[in-house]
Amino acid sequence: MPGVTSSCSVLGLISLMMSLALPVLAAAEIDWLPSSERWAQERALYQKAAAELDSGAWNRYQEMRDRLRDYPLGVDLDFSIKLGQLHDMTAEEARLFMTSAEGTPLASRFLVAYLRHKAQDRRWQSFLDVLDDVPEMPELQCYYYRAKLATGEREVAFQGAARLWNVGFSQDDACDPLFDRWIALRGLDDAVIWSRALKAFDAKNGHLIRYVKRFASVPLRRDLDELAAVYRRPSRVEGDHHQPSARHADILVSGVVRLAQLSPARAYQTFRSLREDDTFTEAHLRTVTSAIVRHSLFAERSPAPPDWVEAQIASLRDDDLTVIWLRNAIGDGEWEAVGIALEWLSPDLRAQDRWRYWSARSLEALGGKDPQSLWESLATARSFHGFLAADRLAVDYQLNAVSPTTPSQAFTGPTRLGVGRAQELLALGDWRQAKEQWRHTLNQMPQTERAALGQVALERGWPDLATDAANAGESWDRLDLRFPRSYWQTFQSVADELEVDPYELLSLARRESGLYPRARSKVGARGLMQLMPATARSVANDRDEVYGGASSLYDPSTNITLGATYYVDLLRRFEGNRVKALAAYNAGPSRVVRWTERDMEVDQWVDSIPFGETREYVQAVLAYLVIYRTRAEQPVSLLTEAERKELY
């Protein structure tokens, strides 16, 4: 068909999707959602239509497309065609397609393509006619204000330019013509230039500080030179003797904050010598104090004086700083200090299970007020700390689950299209696009309806999507959705081989990947157990098995086997202590060895683990194990007797 182009072969994409496909299980019937099996003929026709579209056989393609009118992936074919027609497409035609694609990510993807195309063609009115509001992407915002400028709305355009320019990083190149016009007609005042320079300093962007100097007045250039010098060598603020001014106060604050990263003690001494400067504002004082305190709490050497740090935390009432201080006090067993610092937390944070636990724990350690009522209240909570409290009282764990409800049949048309499209993408083996579609559908729904869609996923055999729905709907008590027994036979088989609890492995995978077999982290960990390829290769070699490469880690059986083997190796290294093994699985065994050089009880150690991710990870996996085994009516204990008695 003339004018039809595509950046990638539709047929090639389909072939890749089919190569990744897993067997589709028989699904429960839902009256508005035909099963995957019932769409088998349409799916085959869709693949043929995609092949015809790639070959350019328009007449045969059109006949097939007409027969796919009600098939959810028909919109994908239309998307490919519409991308090839952007040059001559009107805003009205674009809106019509986006309406037909409503409920899928294709609508917003198409909008981005349309806007970029019209911007590149300088067809600014067509660009604006398809929009109801300012786009979210900075690049498209730049085009949007350029369109406003081209169509005569200069004031709107220049207000947008001012907001986009005043940031601590370099903006998208699409902004350059807008900025050039704005600066040429309006100029840049020193206040805006200085504001951007300070943001660049905070963002550790020294190049940008030098760049904005070209627009500055002569007096401002001197201050920018000093700001750049302090950026390169923050110790310049020590013994500073410049004349006081508002901009120089900004320089001193930025310099002391940067110096605090290197030596909180030196920053503290400098701050003491400078704080009487009457050009310092209350905001300046709070910024510097917070920075020195934060870095002192983490500093192994050269912190600010402890008494001063404690006094500032009590005064600032900053939850982040208070929590860091509390973790240190908990690790040191300073129970009186813990009790005092808990009062510095905001009421909402203080009401969390974690801090209720440490309130009871500190009272118990000090032997004053009886914490029994606190323990009893906390023991009814479904959380790591709630389970710890239940253990202290020797009472049953409380799961507080709610029963499933009948899913609503009143889902909107876009919701039904999205679910159908997710189902067909799964049938074709395209897990990533199916996941994207599912999350898009959830985000477009009222939060109160999302759990009902999760039940649809559970009935269809999509456990990770059911969990996504429960999380998106904040349906924390729908344990049937949040904790499915996915790949259970594989977990059982591997657990039998390695002599480990299958629920333990399942809980680990639930935390690692949400039971999504194609999960991939930012650092490259893959699959259900989130294995790094290098770790997987090493484990496979130890098992005298051939390593199938990184792509093999998306196979659930391979991933569970290698991940479980690695976990069992860690258990052996740490003499069966699951708390340490789990921490090592997340952060590495060498770190755990360094972290266990003090004599702490297990609850202290877990809550004072230096890495927040690892701290939450250990607590989550152990709590998930309690939930899984309790739901399966299996005996369970949050911690073993040996784990409780060991010092860490």
Image (spheres, rainbow, N blue to C red):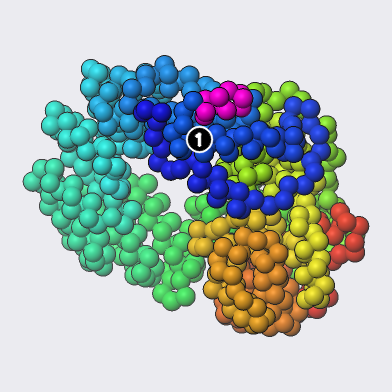
Q: Where is residue 32 in the image (x, y as percent from the top left)?
A: 74, 27
Which secondary structure type mostly characterizes the magenta part of the structure? Answer: helix
Residue closer to the observer: 395 or 29:
29
Residue closer to the observer: 281 or 325:
325
Q: Is residue 422 magenta?
A: no
Which residue does the numbered mark 1 point to in the structure image? 52
Residue 439 visible in the shown view = no
Occupied quadrant, residue 525: bottom right
Q: Is mark 1 on a helix, strand or loop?
A: helix
If the image is split into quadrants, where does the C terminus sit?
bottom right
Specify the amino acid type for callout 1: Glu
The residue under the point 49% across, 66% down is 297
Residue 203 visible in the shown view = yes
Occupied quadrant, residue 206: bottom left
Q: What stretch is highlighted in magenta?
A: 60-69
Q: Where is residue 279 in the image (x, y as percent from the top left)?
A: 26, 48
Occupied quadrant, residue 36: top right
Residue closer to the observer: 428 or 27:
428
Please identify the residue farthest to the left as the structure is shown.
218
If the image is split into quadrants, where does the N terminus sit?
top left
Q: Is residue 64 magenta?
A: yes
Q: Image height check: is 494 above or below 628?
A: below
